[in-house]
Image (tube, rainbow, N blue to C red):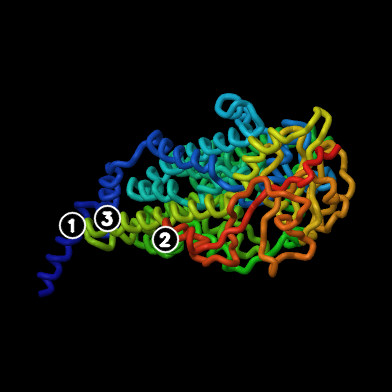
Amino acid sequence: MSATMRSRKPATSTSTAASGLTASDKDSKKENVHDQEEMRLWAPNFHSAFSLLAVVRVLSALINIISDCDETFNYWEPLHNLVYGFGLQTWEYSPAYALRSYLYLLVHAIPAKLGAIFVFGNTKLGFFFGLRVALAFFSAASEALFYRGIVHAFGPVVGRYTLVLLAFNSGLFLASTAFLPSSFVMYLLMLFSYSWMVSDTTFSTTALVAGVTAVLCGWPYVGVMCVPFFFDSIARFGVMRPIATGLVVVSLILSLELAVNYHYYHKLVLPALNIVLYNVLSSGSELYGTEPWHFYAQNLALNFNVAAVLAALSAPVTAITVVFRRHTRRQALFLTPLWIWLVIMTLQAHKEERFLFPVYPLLCAAAAVSLKAIAAIFPRRLGSFVAVLALAVYAALSAMRITSVATQYGAPLRLYQHMSTELLATRGATSTNAMVVVCVGKEWHRFPSHFFFPNHVRLQFIRSGFHGQLPAYFNTTYDVPPHMNDLNQDEPSRYVPITSCDFVVDRTVPAASAHPDEPGFESDPDWTELHAEPYLLSEASHRGLRAFYVPFYTPSHVTFTSYAVYGRTDQRQPAQ
């Protein structure tokens, strides 16, 4: 027996030694063979992906709403001031605080002007949509590259799922053409992720440039999302090269940022540093509202629907995959910035939908990873059916969400477009020196910018139920304006009497919910409605139908109010 045992043991050992593989090595080899077979599967190339995404993004440029007043007053209005010589200024642009970057504005001015000249007839409205279309193409290109990076790092199956999720996502439909730093860094972080994922054997300088630009010129907080790349680079290429290259890139971009801002502020300022100091050393951001911890979960449920659940599952799916397939550790590393950002943002008291824009593409990739893992549980054909069904439901819900936002909340943009092309163009100033005044009260935050007004028209504010700080007109970019504070305290100097107004834009609300400081112009004999658009009355409409548009059903089961522009009944001449 012992002899037999001894004779068998060397035989097994010899067999293993002859193959040179342990059981773990064999499993790994099988996995690698499977991965190599998967990499031979079809996936759309960059040009096909870009074409698909560009169609959706250009549609966004044309019908997307402005969902955040910060977009208007912190970016569109200062850009209008740079291009046309006047615009509204928020306290963030006061040299006393200098929280906003002029370099960020300038990099948007050139493509906007080109779009206005060659596509939209070189008008102010053309400038607005020219910039949006430029953002649409830049987003589509960034997304197509990001998708190709996913194909390279995760395989064609995850890549194809990611492409579908990107193309139909309602959150990306909003974010892709928004003139906001959070959208700007979203583009840059897609370039960053692509460069990182395809740099198998060389250090990615492109990823470094994209990351540094996002931090210094866009939104400094996204620097935390670049930390995994930094440590990965050090682990693979040593300390010296990443740090030395990083110092050169930071020096170049920082010099440009300082020079441009010095030109406009007339002093050396770094807005990226100032905004961090303002938010970290004080509770300034909380002056603008706080939200519960589940705010982002609700937001993702609306904008990602099925994909939100899949993205949440990607954390345990990735963890399990790493345990059993060690070569996928780097794949997990590529998704790490997503979880870092979600944790940090959830812990902040002040929350905004746009704060999640930078990770929308990574959420799509994470959802794709989970979808592939779930489909793999079933037999091949059934798994494919499950995946297609999930994507079809996702696309349908996303389309319903996009339609709901555009049709039920798009009245302000449609109204101001009508004013720009019809009302103000035909009923404007009676002389070249006359200034027409359009007033807003409670609807101040839905003003889309002076790009919708001819040069002889100005916006003014009348008293309403809002008692925070409103913007004032720029004098210069370098003088400290009077009557501005960083505490969101009301400034009485912002308001004009109703007698100064030639037109008023307002939204009709039920008498029971009307604020005493907000008169209803629809019943005022001194004012006549000139044009109106339907706007959803949220408090009188079903929550589900507010969020998702159901064809042939929603219009008859929600309540609309009137979003209108009023002119003086006496048809008096514009204010001088």
Are the two marked residues, 1 and 3, in contact with CB atoms closer than 8 angstroms?
Answer: no
The alpha-carbon separation of the residues under discs 1 and 3 comes to 43 Å
Between disc 3 and disc 2, the foreground one is 2
Find the residue positioned furthest to the top: 118
Q: Amino acid at mark 1?
A: Thr
Q: Quadrant of the N terminus?
A: bottom left
- Crowding around mark 1 (Cα neighbors within 10 Å: few <14, some 14 to 19, many 20+) is few
Taking the spot 42% from the left edge, 43% from the top edge, the residue there is 147
Quarter where residue 436 is shown: top right
Pinpoint residue 203: horizontal percent, then vertical percent.
50, 39
Query: On the rendered structure, is 158 left or right of 297?
Result: left
Query: On the rendered structure, is 512 left or right of 152?
Result: right
Taking the spot 42% from the left edge, 56% from the top edge, the residue there is 551
Q: Amino acid at mark 3?
A: Ser
Are the two marked residues, 3 and 2, in contact with CB atoms closer than 8 angstroms?
Answer: no
134, 346: nearer the viewer: 134
